[in-house]
Amino acid sequence: MSEPTESSVRAEVRAWLEANWNPEYGLVEWRTKLIDSGWGAPHYPKQWHGRGLPVHFNAIVEEEFARIGAVGVAKAGIRTLAAATILDHGTDLHKEKFLRRILTGEDTWCQLFSEPGSGSDMAGAVTRADRKGNKWVINGQKVWTTSAHKAHWGLLLARANWDVPKHKGLAYFVLDMKQPGVQVHPLKQMNGHASFNQVFFTDAMVEPEMMVCDVGDGWKVATTTLMHERRGADGLRSWATASSRKGRIYQEERAEIASTMEPYKWYPQRAGRVDLVMERARATGKLADPVVRQEIAKLLIMSKAAEWTARRARAAQEQGKPQGPEGSLGKLVSSHVARQAARVHTYLSGADALLSGEDSPLGGVIAEILVSVPATSIAGGTDEIQRNIISERVLKMPKEPSVDTDKPFKDVPRNVAATSS
Amino acid sequence: MRFSFTPEQEEFRSSLRRALEARSPAKEVRRLMATEAGFERESWQKLNRELGLTAIHIPEAYGGGGFGQADLAIVLEEMGRGLLCAPFLSTVLASAAILNAGSEEQKRALLPALAAGERTATLAVSEADGRNDADGVTTTATQSGAAWRLEGTKSFVLDGHTADLIVVLARRPGSRGEDGLAFFVVEGDAPGLERRRLKTMDETRKLARLAFASVEAKLLGDAGKAAAALARTMQQAAILLANEMVGGAERLREDALAYAKMRMQFGRSIASFQTTKNKAADMLVDVELAKSAAYYAAAALDEGDAELPALASLAKACAAEACLQTAIHAVQMHGGIGFTWDNDTHLWFKRAKSSEILFGDANQHRELMMQHWKH
């Protein structure tokens, strides 16, 4: 067989779509066909619903889907991270049991990593996994869990060995969320939304075959999940726009998108809404104020320079050049932009910035910006952690001397209130 | 090409960097900055001839290399890094003004000697108040027969005390604003021209005050119509200086980082303290963002972008803040030694300060950017 090329892949997927696509299919029905053909996730291995194609062909396949208006496999949320982790580290049993229903969208997943006592220090997790008889028994608490209330399955990082250093005693499980030992409570944020959950485990059960890799390898597996999370951020965004076309499948897809994207509805405000600044500056008459003009200009400069820096990074990547420092800065820069945007929105709103809800400008959007921006510099790795990553990985500066990586975890000082040990 | 350089440009940059590292070590910078001229004609001519630096942006028809502004910007960035003491920016800006304002015949007459490095030149726009726009011009040009006579004082003129050729912005007596402006060419040794070197905080960049008392001058292009040429020349100046600044800022950042890794306190390298690491990460962010803006604006010059005026001011404001902030952090990371004369950090710190102000500071350029974007 000849090597696939851009044009051969394009021709093949186009022919398949033309022969098979029909907007009157049900969502699961169509995705089942898609999975059987391998075109739903062409970069997955052939025996696991893919075509074994190099990942860069995905862009071409997506173009052909967009051209004909075909709906793809379920991609949003934690499910694709679960699939990628299972493909990398799971057993055939895991692949058999989970991959298909991930791609059809029938199963929803959540990520059970962060804990009240371990945020930035995720490897310091104290949720316990104890082997009792032929089961693993889970006790403890996770937090910041998106979609936990809907999830069928959770990716769980828990401590199975307390006598070894912290990174060595972790295990990684696939946990059945629909069981009596798992309780999910919404977590209300300072902006009033509750997009995340707290998850409590009280003697929750996991079958031994639902452990991914061995005890001790949990951190390595979690790192894989996080790496896919960083790479996959763009997929979520592109997928989040629902098609307004007519047809049964589009209707079902719109409902799926509305439900999946619900927790993220305030995310644009979190980033500061730079797009609203000029409109607001004109509407409020503050554009004439020389001090405010300076602050707006600082924001626009920062925002443009951030965008161009990201494009430099992408250009280098596309040309196959080694990644330069510009590729590691985006997360930190977006915090600066968000904070400056919130400052400018405050100047522009004046006394109206005191108000909330429908009394606040733009039907509450301005108030929501002001109380959502603080999330930007915390979620997905705080600014402080980003600076450590930049200084250690890019600038090759030494780590702070560690006090916890070499001693048994049971001897490491930790937050007492988190869980019993 | 706004987001990456071609392999040829990368190659050019590295050979230039090697040459400047060899020719302009800090010891040489210190030697030259202490001289009256601020550079040595012979060694500068040699380096310029070998690398064709003042020729880069000049079209081949006028004896130049026919390359783009983005290539010129690379040279500025590397010179900012190497802190080369040479009348390069001054000569380049003079040739830019001649290209923007001069007639075909004048370009053919004036540019080959500048391109070849046989003559140095400078651009005299600012006066005692340091402004860089049309409204600040009070120097007058009066026609007498075929010749013009200049009357007035220019200040903050780069290498003004040594330039062989001076491009002077002046106005028709009684004219105001953008009306009546024209560029003129004056010989450095013209009778009636009094040149005085100013004592500058940044000794690596020499500035002069030029007093014109009925000095004979040649008109460039058409009388009274230089407003557009002035605007474009000042945009080029802002963009080129922004590129020079990011080169200097990167050098400051790298040197401070290397020092922090080496310096031991409390039994460990100070680079292992998070407070130092956080500062180093912030410095990288500042410098990389400013680079992106400087590169983007330089490419916009070549592509004739309609947003050029805004982009030039954006790049200058961004680089000015980033370069100065980097310099402040760099001194701080060095600690006490960073405040000494013997340590080299102050050389780049002072250049950062001088570049922050030259051709308009960040506040001015932010306001200009807003106006150009019609905000």
Image (tube, coloured by chain):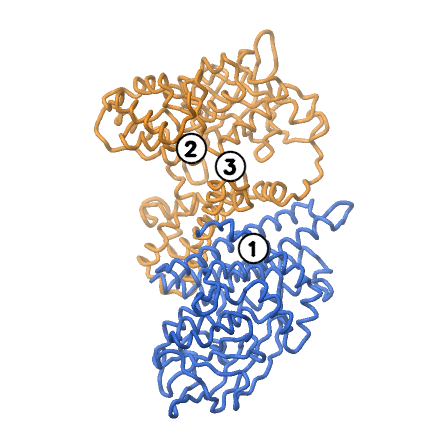
Q: Gap between marks 2 and 3, in whole Å?
A: 14 Å
Q: Colour of chain A?
A: orange
Which of the 4 quarters of the picture holds residue A165?
A: top right
Q: Give the residue at x 43% y 68%.
A: B61
Q: Do callouts 1 and 2 mark residues in contact (Cβ within 8 Å)?
A: no
Q: State the image coordinates of residue A289 (x, y, percent, origin top left).
A: 39, 65
Q: Secondary structure under badge 1?
A: helix
Q: Say above or below: B127 vs B5.
A: below
User: Disc 1 or disc 3, which is closer to the eye?
Assistant: 1
- The answer to whether A249 appears left or right of A166 in the picture is left
Q: Secondary structure under badge 2?
A: loop
Q: Secondary structure under badge 3?
A: loop
Between A195 and B127, the one lying in front of the other is B127
- The answer to whether A121 appears left or right of A270 in the picture is right
Q: State the image coordinates of residue A94 (x, y, percent, origin top left).
A: 49, 15
Q: Amino acid at mark 1?
A: Arg
Which residue is disc 3 drawn over?
A380
Which residue is disc 1 drawn over?
B13
Q: Say above or below: B26 vs A344.
A: below
Q: Gap between marks 1 and 2, in whole Å?
A: 50 Å
Which residue is disc 2 drawn over?
A195
Q: Do callouts 1 and 3 mark residues in contact (Cβ within 8 Å)?
A: no
* Residue A399 appears in the picture as rendered: yes
| Chain drawn in blue | B
Q: Say above or below: B188 vs A351.
A: below
